[in-house]
Image (cartoon, rainbow, N blue to C red):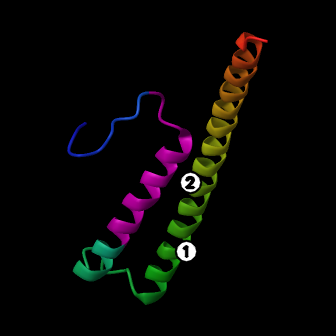
Amino acid sequence: MVGGMKVRKGKISIGEVILSLGLIMATFGVINYFTLYEPDMDLQGLFNWISFTILILAIGIYAVIISLIKRLDNIEGKISAIVIELKKRKPD
């Protein structure tokens, strides 16, 4: 347990990387607009940035869902193998 969260062992999926990239982009877009760090960013520029960020987030969410489905299929296969093994061991 680190900070009250369970640490998951394993690889980081590409979906998680894309999702975090989209969240970082969204944060920088909002900061850019409200601090006017980039003077060229008007309302239309903000909407363009938001639409691009939503596209990146959608791709990331899709990839995360696909990786979760693959992980669940793997777990389901392991559970069915355990059930079959237990049925073989059951005394008659």
Q: Quadrant of the N terminus?
A: top left
Front label number (1 vs 2): 2
Identity of the residue drawn at 43% across and 80% down: 46
- Residue type, label 1: Ser
> Could you say which is closer to the camera, residue 38 or residue 86?
86
How many other residues sit within 10 Å of disc 1, few (<14), some (14-19) or many (≥20)?
few
- Residue type, label 2: Gly
Left or right of residue 31, residue 21 in this image: right
Residue beneath label 2, please? Answer: 60
Identity of the residue drawn at 34% across and 67% down: 27
- Decide: is 77 above or below 16: above
- Decide: is 16 above or below 89: below
- Residue range corresponding to the magenta coloring: 10-29
Q: Are marks 1 and 2 in contact (CB under 8 Å)?
A: no
Identity of the residue drawn at 66% across and 28% down: 79
> Could you say which is closer to the camera, residue 80 or residue 33?
80
Left or right of residue 28, residue 83 in this image: right
| Magenta residues, dominant SS class | helix
Query: How many labels were placed on the picture?
Result: 2
Residue 76 sits in quarter: top right
Q: Residue 35: give x, y in percent of width and height.
A: 22, 79
Q: Residue 83: give x, y in percent of width and height.
A: 71, 24
Q: Secondary structure at mark 1?
A: helix
Q: Quadrant of the C terminus?
A: top right
Magenta stretch: residue 42 in it? no
Residue 89 sits in quarter: top right
Separation of residues labelled 1 and 2 (CA atoms): 14 Å
Residue beneath label 1, please? Answer: 51
